[in-house]
Image (cartoon, rainbow, N blue to C red):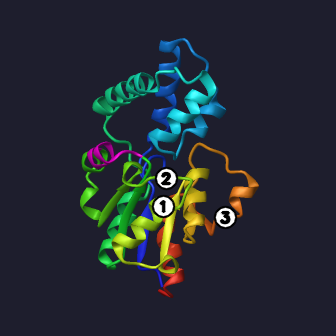
Amino acid sequence: MINGVIFDMDGLMFDTERLSTKAWIHTATQLNIDIPMEFINSLKGVSAFYCKQLFQNRFGPSFDFEYARSLRTEHMNLVIKESGIPIKKGLIELLSYLKSNSIVAAVATSTNHVLAEKMLKMAGVYDYFETVVCGDSVVKSKPEPDIYLKALQIIGKSSDECFVLEDSPNGIGAGYAAKIRVIHIPDEIVIEDDVKKKVFKICCDLQEVITCIEKENNVR
């Protein structure tokens, strides 16, 4: 019986990973550095702490990650201010379904709490969620399971009565390590076969998740 659904945020609920990709490319041009797509993809679904490690591993310990990140954030904020938060297909339908069926919804995102709360409120979906667990709420963020384990603890559900919804390999790994069944909704990144083995189900969009829940809960 599914009594809880834990959502990733960027690339899953909001079409922000594409914005982030473009923002990092823009930032690389400003800083006159080379960051290939493979490297940009490795940043997705991880906390700022791990992102900093990845940048300093690539460009050296003196690389000013905070400055680079501020340029990237500034560019993203300008786009969002002009166009709003791009919501993924089926999000509102799924959240409404969960609410009407008394199924708990939670967020587990590597994004920091201030930004995550701001984006959820801008998109008009903040009140659907019982809790929002962020990358700065745990010592080890995705791909470690800590963020999902904390979400389970807060909502008071066991791993076998929840689904995790994810788009990135790091997020899938985190949900799998927390022993929660992971539903993958593909976004930008092609998932390798070793990651696919950790996925319970692949859905083309968030609305299709409703069918998975109804099947699991024997709803006719």
Residue 214: x and y in percent read: 48, 80
Instruction: Give me the disc on residue 140.
Output: 2
Q: How would you rate the neighbour count of disc 1 (Cα within 10 Å): few for under 14, some for 14-19, many for 20 or more?
A: many
Circle 1/circle 2 CB separation < 8 Å = yes
Which residue lies most toward the right here?
A: 193
Task: Identify which amino acid the numbered label 1 is placed on.
Answer: Asp
Closer to the camera: disc 2 or disc 3?
2
Horizontal side of 102 relative to 192 (left or right) equals left
Instruction: Give me the disc on residue 146.
Output: 1
Q: CA distance from mark 2 to mark 3?
A: 20 Å
Q: CA distance from mark 1 to mark 2?
A: 6 Å
Q: Specify start and end residues of the magenta stretch as a single range.
A: 111-118
Task: Say which residue label 3 marks.
Answer: 198
Instruction: Give me the disc on residue 214.
Output: none
Circle 2/circle 3 CB separation < 8 Å = no
- x 46%, y 64%: residue: 148
Q: Quadrant of residue 43?
A: top right
In the rendered structure, which disc, 2 or 3, sits on the residue that comes first in sequence?
Answer: 2
Residue 193 vs 208, above or below: the answer is above
Horizontal side of 2 relative to 133 (left or right) equals right
SS at badge 3: loop
Q: CA distance from mark 1 to mark 3?
A: 17 Å
Name the magenta segment's main secondary structure: helix
Q: Quadrant of residue 130?
A: bottom left
Q: How would you rate the neighbour count of disc 3 (Cα within 10 Å): few for under 14, some for 14-19, many for 20 or more?
A: many
Which residue lies most toward the front here?
A: 61
Task: Identify which amino acid the numbered label 2 is placed on.
Answer: Lys
Q: How would you rate the neighbour count of disc 2 (Cα within 10 Å): few for under 14, some for 14-19, many for 20 or more?
A: some
- x 29%, y 29%: residue: 82
| Front one among 205 and 160 | 160
Residue 56: x and y in percent read: 56, 28
Image label count: 3
